[in-house]
Image (cartoon, rainbow, N blue to C red):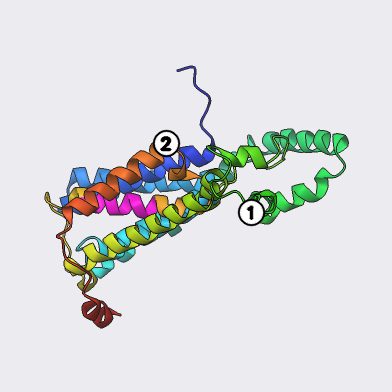
Amino acid sequence: FNQAVPKVTGLTRSFGIISLSLLIIFAYKKRTNLFSSTIFSLIVLISIFIWMGQSRGTLICYYITSIFFIIFLNNFNQFKKFLIIISITFFSIVASDIIINIAKNNVLEIEESIETNKINESISKDKNMLPRIFEIEAGTSGRFTLWKNALERYEKNRFFGYGPQGDRVLIDQSNIYGNNVSNTMIYGLLSGGYFSLTILILIYIYTAYIVLNYFLINKIFLNKFSINKENIFVVASIVYTIFFMIRSLFENSFGVFSIDFLIVILSLFIIENKTPKKKINFKLLKSFL
């Protein structure tokens, strides 16, 4: 459609949301038949694609959220829960490694050669790039450096920050890691200052509150929860919210007006409106803990 090819982070994020949605449908159907078997096969297949994408942020979001859902938000027996977790984690990792090993002789050597040439050309132009390349290989994708540089350059007297996309103002366009600070909290500080950061912190706290409140009211910790027509959208909203809250630690995510933002804001609206107006029973919470 004449659009740029999506980056692997965005592509795997989309796969993650699709897989989680299928997982919710799989738990909702309950009965084992051809339809549920097909759904489960798609979940495993998508999990393989997600692992092959090797987007660390998506892997963390996807695995934590899916395991959280499998443990708490359904009435599967313990063996079935264990089987599903193994299928989307261990099996997907093993299967993707087998696929990569089969393809590497034909594809990976060519790609490695191209990347090596690009790196060598870059090093020849900029001798100071070598230590920065090793930082990338260390596994952080330059995020720690971006966060450190952005916070050091932020003028502490700016109460309202630098405006939308403030990270582009503080991070040099020629930076090898890009000019996206890749953290919602830091992005909020840079763009909206202390005012925006305070609001974001309150959003995180309130999100944790309404999700915990829903768990306590429905006694989900007692492992008696079942997905039905009345709560399926709330369950999906909780799953999506957890996914993007984790993602916000590694990307600007819902801090920018985007698909992430629309999903999170709608999910919070659904959770809030579908939860009975009761305050958290801290005595009940203490008994669970």
Q: Nearer the viewer, residue 70 or 197?
A: 197
Instruction: Quickly name the residue at label 2.
Output: 258
Query: Could you tell me the amino acid type at mark 1?
Result: Lys
Residue 126 percent across, percent down from the top left: 85, 38
Name the kind of residue labelled 2 in the image: Ser
Mark 1, other Cα within 10 Å: few <14 / some 14–19 / many ≥20: few
Q: Earlier in the sequence, mark 1 or mark 2?
A: 1
Query: Dividing the image into 4 quarters, which one contains the N terminus?
Result: top left
Tell me which segment is drawn in magenta: 234-243
Residue at 51 percent across and 31 percent down: it is 6
Q: Is residue 242 left or right of residue 98?
A: left
- Magenta stretch holds residue 62: no
Residue at horizontal 17 percent and vertical 67 percent from the top: 217
* 263 or 32, nearer to the observer: 263
Q: Secondary structure at mark 2?
A: loop
Looking at the figure, which quarter contains the C terminus? bottom left
Q: Residue 37: x and y, percent?
A: 24, 47
Q: Quadrant of residue 156?
A: bottom right
